[in-house]
Image: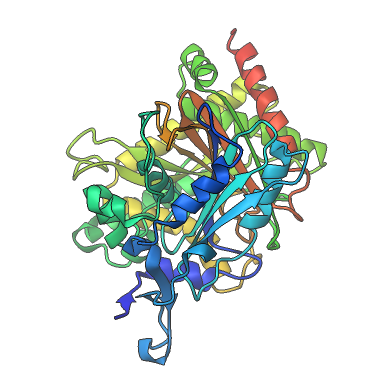
Amino acid sequence: MPTPMDPTSSGFLFAESRTQPMHVGGLQLFAKPVGAGRNFAKDLYDEMLTHDDPAPLFLKRPHRSLGTAGQWCWVEDEQFDLEYHVRHNALPKPGRVRELLELCSRLHGTRLALDRPLWEFHLIEGLRDGRLAVYTKMHHALVDGVSSMRLLQRVLSTDPDERDQPPMWSAAHVRTSPALREAAEQLPEHGAFGLPSGLLGSALSIGADAAGLPGALVRTLSRGVRNETSQVSLYAPRTLVNTTITGSRRFAAEDWPIERIRGVGRATGTTLNDVVLAMCSGAMRTYLSELGGLPEASLVAMVPVGLQAKSSQSASARGGNAVGAVMVALGTDLADPADRLRSVHESMVSGKRALGEMTPAQIVAMSALGLAPAVLPPMFKVQGLGRPPFNLVISNVPGPRRPHYFNGMRLEGLYPLSIPIHGMALNITCTSYDGQMGFGLTGCRRTVPHLQRLLGHLDSELLALERAAGL
């Protein structure tokens, strides 16, 4: 029986095209357990294929027809083929991380088949250091990047001696984990750029909070007109990353010790997230300067922000966390790294304060207003008609703080792959894990040249920030 699809999930399917695949991905690096034989990867792959009892989430495929009035819905795939979704790959020699990232880039640029459940799992061997890699991708209509990361983490263990752990798609997790059962049975809770999936749709049905919307709208637009941090940006310059993209992808990844990043924050009175944004700011400034494309005005990044409840009037007072989007001026027009960090910090403080003055429904509506110029044009195939609402997306997704394992393999690296869209050819997503901050850079290979150079620029910028902080 078809299950209705929420408007946001449908929007991701309508927006998808050959040049704009709408799936998120993740790369995990594992060290084999001590004593693992030459056939360890093959034996692991064969064992995972025995779990041919997928949870409901992994059996859902999109469907639309005359019977659904042309609207997308979910149906259970009655011809499910596990070996299509779960694949065993080997890298060509010399088996460097470079070859691994090239493979992930190609896999990430390939659309998921809409006549099958919208996910793939790739077990990859052939790294010359002996490690194994896992690349997964799931359509944004099915689950967002944050939720897919949580699904992967829930199948891991903190016990290095635990064995017989079922893979992520196995229904065994649903039977043993109420949280995973809820995730499998419900529609995704998040949507574009890691924000609530009701972001656009819910803005149309605010309800009791509608009375406060005019005031929130005036304040938001007023801040945007004054070029202050808010949910709306009116002054993002056009750069080489703000153009129509192709379907080819380039993925670059690296990690840095969290303690180094925190050290800069402690010395300067800023947060870890501020320093991450400042690293991206300096890296983008150098990158665009090298290519002769650094604009005079500061780049603007869309940054998802979570606010803790602080008072009965705060954005999150009605339960849990309130999540919104702020458009942060990165300070790429400033030559000094300390000035860039200070600018980012002030922008983030201002943006959080603005969000904290709104109710959850008002945050939803104002964030939707700011995102609409980026999300709607690709959906209706009318992109490129005006100034970009922001230049790139920078997200920071918290991951496990302790080492995790899968069937004796230690997880050594965790890197997210995200979605470039028309007009936004670069996405930077970070994930923390076991004392490291992993940066995943996903860009259009043909419109964002030499993407891997950004990794070196990120490293140089962290060094520059440490020197500026007196470390």
Q: Position of residue 283 (x, y in %)?
A: 68, 32
**Front-most of 37 and 219?**
37
**In this orientation, does residue 331 appear?**
no
The colour scheme used to paint the residues is rainbow
**Front-most of 130 and 283?**
130
**In this orientation, does residue 362 appear?**
yes
Extreme residue toward the top, this view:
470
Note whether 182 is above or below 353 in the view shown.
below
Residue 399 is drawn in which quadrant? top left
Q: Is residue 315 left or right of residue 304?
A: left
Taking the spot 37% from the left edge, 59% from the top edge, the residue there is 197
**Front-most of 205 and 226?**
205
Residue 132 is drawn in which quadrant? top right
Quadrant for the C terminus, please.
top right
Q: Is residue 319 left or right of residue 138?
A: left
Q: Position of residue 344 (x, y in %)?
A: 53, 30
**Front-most of 207 and 408?**
408
Extreme residue toward the bottom, this view:
66
Q: Position of residue 94 (x, y in %)?
A: 77, 38
Taking the spot 35% from the left edge, 29% from the top edge, the residue there is 159
Quadrant for the N terminus, please.
bottom left
Q: Position of residue 124 (x, y in %)?
A: 60, 46
